[in-house]
Image (cartoon, helix red, strand yellow):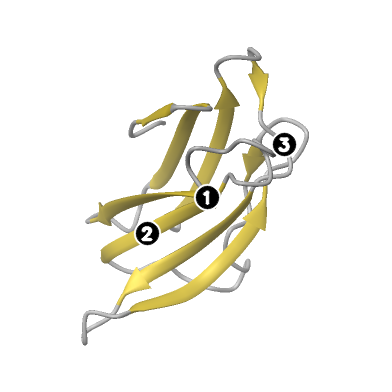
Amino acid sequence: MTCKITTHVLDLVQGRPANNIPAVLEKLGDSYTWKSIGKGTTNDDGRIDDLIGENDSISKGTYRLTFDVSSYFEPNSFYSSIPIIFNITDTNRLYHVPLLLSRFGYSTYRGS
């Protein structure tokens, strides 16, 4: 199995998946700068399964997945973006990073 990063965004207030939320995946480089390695937009089920290309690989390191939620909550968005920073230590696993979302709060966890 090759390493893969997926996500799922759920709108806790509406009780449904949050669609059309853009997200960017970045990796922290040796010079402590973030490099964009992938992006996507949540589908009708609130999922992004293809953040990086099929032939791209994920290596050990620190990653940041940033969700642009401002357009989802227009016109009154408290958060403009939500970054989730996490570490990959085992490149033979799936890393599922869910986001549970409301207009004034959010939560995340290591999914399976």
Q: In the image, which is nearer the foreground, mark 2 or mark 1?
A: 1
The residue drawn where x is 47% and y is 33% is 99
The residue drawn where x is 22% and y is 56% is 89
Picture quadrant where residue 53 is located: bottom right
Q: CA distance from mark 3 to mark 2?
A: 20 Å
Q: Is residue 69 above or below residue 33?
A: above
Mark 2: which secondary structure? Answer: strand
Q: In the rendered structure, which amino acid carries the disc numbered 3?
A: Asn
Identify the residue under disc 2: 64
The residue drawn where x is 29% and y is 80% is 33
For this orientation, the residue located farthest to the right is 44
Residue 19 is labelled as 3
For this orientation, the residue located farthest to the front is 76
Picture quadrant where residue 13 is located: top right
Task: Look at the numbered discs 2 and 1 and tell me whether their residues touch, using CB distance below 8 Å.
Answer: no
Question: Percent position (x, y) of residue 55?
Answer: 59, 73
Q: In the rendered structure, which amino acid carries the disc numbered 2?
A: Arg
Picture quadrant where residue 63 is located: bottom left
Q: Is residue 33 above or below residue 93?
A: below
Badge 2 density bin: few <14, some 14–19, many ≥20, Cα 10 Å: some
Question: Percent position (x, y) of residue 48?
Answer: 63, 46
Q: In the rendered structure, which amino acid carries the disc numbered 1?
A: Phe
Badge 3 density bin: few <14, some 14–19, many ≥20, Cα 10 Å: some
Badge 1 density bin: few <14, some 14–19, many ≥20, Cα 10 Å: many
Quarter that holds the C terminus: top left
Identify the residue under disc 1: 67
Q: Is residue 16 above or below residue 89?
A: above
Q: CA distance from mark 1 to mark 3?
A: 12 Å
